[in-house]
Image (cartoon, rainbow, N blue to C red):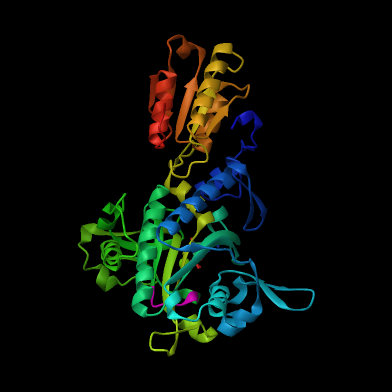
């Protein structure tokens, strides 16, 4: 993409309404624009990152064997009356009446709707196990929408639902989700710690929230510091293998890590004092096993091996896709702007032309741009007729992890500059080598 042709409405001033750094940078970098309280338009740069995050979610769900689908945002109230949650959910639910006076709602979550899909189409245990999921907009009429996309009213969420014959099978689905979520967050450059949590309105006997540690987080958390040394890494997991998934669960959840809702001072005090931590965290996901709560209320049964009808065991599992943009920025920024992890960056690298209009510099930039594009990478080429300082400030603000700087003086010596946004370190090297380095970082074979 050439910046002269892109739509990047960068703000010079810091917007007064933004209280936390991720909100400020998302507004300043032209990623989002507030449409009304807690509701945002996703401008091209923000939309690109949102899609990158969504893609990682899809890839990791596919790896775990979960099946994507899409349900509508507007739901009929009938199903919610069946489950009993129409009255329970309260004012967070946006209730709508259509022209025929029918009660509708903008879905805050989809347990009822998916249970209805299930009961209409599945009747035998032979069709289990089954895990269906979607990535879809939700609406919760939050009393205090704030912090930009972190606590929106309209937000993008991955919600998955497992259906199993037995509790044992459903707990395997729970573990499978835990493993897949660990991988998902790590690919986004995040450490999200699974912590014992409370079921809330969804209900549930087993539930973990995934928290990213950050001062601006809304949750208070308590943990054993050893937990931050754990890395999932690139280990290969067979998601059908019950013992393997169980082992990962045990590894990542055996140390003390709880949100304030489940915090127990007496148990916490058994952790050696020097390892006890209390901190703030951002909830980026949650997994639940809630047994037969919805299947019993809504008649979602299957015929078991002995011919008798039994309600299925279910769980639901969510990832806050749009909130993740805020969480990643909270975890990765400096005073100049965002620092995107390579896994989610909107463009793989920036190209800054220090002297637009200089024949040699223009030609070198074009060549680098074409080579990177040919490798399947997406560079953002700042080809505007602007002074270098302004170009650097924009690149630093929007946070591309790598920048290639091209100017007449370097070219005389046959070199360009390759700069890491994270460390600020620069290196002079011939253009081909800079390209090869970028290719290698993103796992692309260079010629
Ligand atoms: P919270 O406690 O933050 O209100 P929740 O526990 O009610 O969230 P879940 O039902 O577990 O939310 O939804 C799954 C994920 O969706 C959450 O882990 C969170 O990352 C995200 N999420 C929930 N509410 C919002 C919101 N208002 N804005 C943005 N993301 C949200
Ligand atoms: Mg939650």
User: Does 204 appear in magenta?
Assistant: yes
Q: Nearer the viewer, residue 12 or 115?
A: 115
Q: Residue at x 39, y 64 (%)?
A: 177
- Relative horizontal placement of residue 409, taking residue 140 as reference (left or right): left
Residue at the limit of the structure toward the bottom, as seen here: 308
Q: Quadrant of the N terminus?
A: top right
Range drawn in magenta: 202-206
- Assign the magenta stretch its main secondary structure: loop
* Residue 231 place in picture, x, y as percent: 30, 52
- The quadrant holding residue 390 is top right
Question: Where does residue 238 sit, x and y in percent of width and height?
Answer: 32, 60
Q: Residue furthest right?
A: 99
Where 145 sits versus 231, above or below? below
Q: Is residue 301 found left or right of 74 in the rendered image?
A: left
Q: Is residue 215 visible?
A: yes
Q: Residue at x 43, y 33 (%)?
A: 421
Q: Is residue 410 left or right of residue 104?
A: left
Residue appearing at x 55%, y 73% in the figure: 114
Where residue 230 sits in the image (x, y, percent)? 28, 54
Residue 435 belongs to the span the image colors magenta: no
Query: At x 36% / y 72%, what residue is drawn?
Result: 262
Q: Position of residue 57 (x, y in %)?
A: 47, 55
């Amino acid at each position: 993409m050439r910046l002269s042709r892109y739509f990047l409405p960068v703000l010079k001033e810091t917007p007064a309404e933004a209280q936390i750094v991720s909100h400020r940078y998302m507004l300043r970098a032209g990623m989002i624009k507030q449409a009304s309280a807690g509701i945002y338009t996703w401008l091209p740069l923000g939309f690109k990152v949102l899609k990158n995050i969504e893609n990682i979610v899809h890839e990791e769900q596919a790896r775990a064997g979960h099946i994507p689908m899409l349900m509508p945002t507007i739901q009929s109230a009938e199903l919610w009356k069946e489950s009993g949650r129409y009255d329970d959910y309260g004012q967070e639910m946006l209730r709508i009446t259509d022209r025929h006076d029918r009660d509708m709602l903008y879905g805050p979550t989809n347990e009822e709707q998916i249970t209805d899909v299930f009961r209409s189409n599945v009747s035998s245990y032979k069709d289990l196990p089954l895990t269906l999921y979607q990535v879809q907009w939700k609406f919760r009429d939050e009393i205090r929408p704030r912090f930009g996309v972190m606590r929106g009213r309209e937000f993008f969420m991955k919600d998955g639902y497992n259906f199993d014959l037995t509790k044992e099978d459903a707990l395997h689905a729970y573990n499978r989700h835990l493993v897949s979520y660990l991988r998902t967050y790590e690919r986004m450059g995040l450490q999200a710690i699974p912590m014992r949590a409370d079921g809330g309105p969804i209900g549930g006997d087993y539930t973990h929230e995934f928290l990213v540690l950050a001062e601006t987080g809304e949750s208070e958390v308590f943990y054993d510091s050893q937990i931050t040394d754990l890395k999932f890494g690139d280990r290969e997991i067979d998601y059908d293998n019950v013992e393997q998934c169980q082992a990962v669960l045990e590894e990542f959840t055996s140390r003390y890590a709880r949100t304030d809702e489940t915090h127990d001072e007496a148990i916490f005090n058994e952790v050696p004092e020097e390892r006890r931590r209390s901190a703030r965290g951002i909830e980026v996901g949650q997994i639940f096993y809630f047994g037969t709560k919805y299947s019993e209320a809504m008649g979602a049964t299957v015929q078991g091996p002995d011919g008798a009808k039994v309600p299925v065991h279910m769980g639901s599992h969510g990832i806050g896709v749009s909130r993740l943009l805020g969480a990643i920025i909270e975890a990765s920024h400096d005073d100049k702007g965002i620092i995107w992890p390579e896994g989610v960056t909107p463009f793989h690298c920036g190209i800054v032309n220090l002297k637009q209009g200089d024949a040699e510099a223009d030609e070198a930039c074009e060549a680098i741009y074409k080579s990177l594009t040919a490798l399947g990478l997406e560079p953002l080429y700042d080809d505007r007729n602007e002074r270098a300082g302004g170009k650097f400030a924009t690149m630093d603000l929007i946070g591309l992890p790598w920048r290639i700087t091209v100017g007449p003086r370097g070219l005389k010596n046959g070199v360009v500059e390759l700069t890491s946004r994270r460390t600020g370190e620069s290196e002079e090297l011939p253009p081909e080598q800079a390209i090869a380095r970028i290719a290698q970082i993103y796992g692309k074979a260079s010629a």
